[in-house]
Image: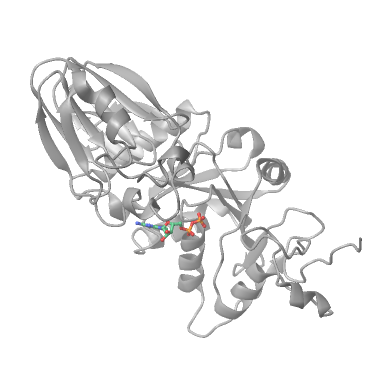
Amino acid sequence: MNEMPQCIGCGTVIQTEDKNGLGYAPASSLEKEMIICQRCFRLKNYNEIQPVSLTDDDFLRILNGLGQQQGLIVKIVDIFDFNGSWLPGLHRFVGNNPVLLVANKADLLPKSVKEKKVINWLKREAKALGLKPVDVKLVSAHKGLGMQEVVEAIEEYRNGKDVYVVGCTNVGKSTFINRIIKQATGEGEIITTSHFPGTTLDMIGIPLDDGSSLYDTPGIINHHQMAHHIDSSELKYIMPKKEIKPKVYQQNAGQTLFIGALARFDFIQGERSAFTVHVANDLPIHRTKLERADQLYEEHKGELLAPPTSKHIDQLPPLVRHEFSIKEPKTDVVISGLGWVTVQHANVVVAAHAPKGVEVFIRPSLI
Ligand code: GDP
């Protein structure tokens, strides 16, 4: 077999099979002398970064490479899926490079959420996972909220060096970089891609003012993300698109709330309490008695309890039960990638059921 050529933009080896993979170019382009991959083509012609994803092994190789460079690492996480969008082991790979943590999709948070509480929670979580970011910023790349502040923070912390933007797929990394490109380039201005010299990091670079570059790294697929268990046709129901409108349920012990067929929330013990559900506005919530819940799920998942609908319910891993004894009032029980339920009263016992592999945890309320 002939060796495949490299992209003249980023140096990645060209492939013609996987449209969402690195180095994709249509087969017809192989006839050309100078081949440019689709990602570089779009950046060059439309000033737009296109998401690409990678396997775990390739990603580890890239992370390893990062530790040998000098610059600022900008790590993007999805505020709704903090655990699902974490890059395990990043702190070990980055070496001495500073990390700026950027939490995206802030536009989805209800207005009542306090930004300071979110930042403090993010700082605590990052620290618990072994990462000490130089700063934590909250943005909506989609709406442009907080972007100016992040651009200024990047300028400050990069200290004249290169910038590497890392993140899982779906956190909004491409949207974020496209925002930065838009802010940095004037109308009609064309940016050129820069090649990462002499390495196989498969990164695409956007030149900064002083000769340094901002590099987009491929997104890794995190298999713990709820989104990977949902058929793409149904994803729109579970991923919030608009600001979340909290829904309040007055519950007695012995009651259960189903969130579609995706999760279940049992009130096991404690005084009557309000449970405030924060999930995508269109997700149906079904209330039932705890003693009936197992049977209801078995008989009605995919139908009364949906999404996922019967067509895709088999793709969903079985629900796993996580019990919490809650001591403090106003505690969030978070199901990563789906949302959270705020338990308003203290001294209650609850159990959250979520698909196997999806993280469930508690935190002080963000409100
Ligand atoms: P990437 O895989 O990390 O490059 O992610 P993309 O930039 O392709 O975005 C993934 C999904 O998240 C898309 O559906 C975007 O529209 C959405 N998204 C990106 N940024 C935001 C944001 O700030 N707010 C909201 N609500 N959605 C966003």
State whether residue 343 is above or below residue 40.
Answer: above
Q: In the rendered image, which quarter is residue 277 located in?
A: top left
How many marks are shown on the rendered structure? 0
Q: Position of residue 336 (x, y in %)?
A: 39, 36
State whether residue 93 is above or below residue 240.
Answer: above
- Residue lying at the far front of the rendered structure: 299
Q: Left or right: where does residue 270 sit relative to residue 93?
A: left
In this rendered view, identify the residue nearer to me: 116 or 203.
203
Q: In the rendered image, which quarter is residue 352 located in?
A: top left
- Quadrant containing the N terminus is bottom right
Quadrant for ligand 1 reads bottom left
- Quadrant containing the C terminus is top left
- Residue lying at the far right of the rendered structure: 1
In this rendered view, identify the residue nearer to me: 212 or 175.
175
In this rendered view, identify the residue nearer to me: 247 or 228.
228
Q: Position of residue 198 (x, y in %)?
A: 82, 58
Q: Left or right: where does residue 210 sit relative to residue 181?
A: right
Q: Position of residue 174 (x, y in %)?
A: 51, 61
State whether residue 150 is above or below residue 264.
Answer: below
In this rendered view, identify the residue nearer to me: 78 or 184.
78
**Which color mode does the image show?**
one colour
Q: Which residue appears at 25% of the width and 47% of the height?
A: 283
**Could one spot residue 268 in this view of the protein?**
yes
Q: Position of residue 81 (x, y in %)?
A: 41, 41
- Residue lying at the far bottom of the rendered structure: 188
**Could one spot residue 333 in this view of the protein?**
no
Q: In the rendered image, which quarter is residue 262 located in?
A: top left
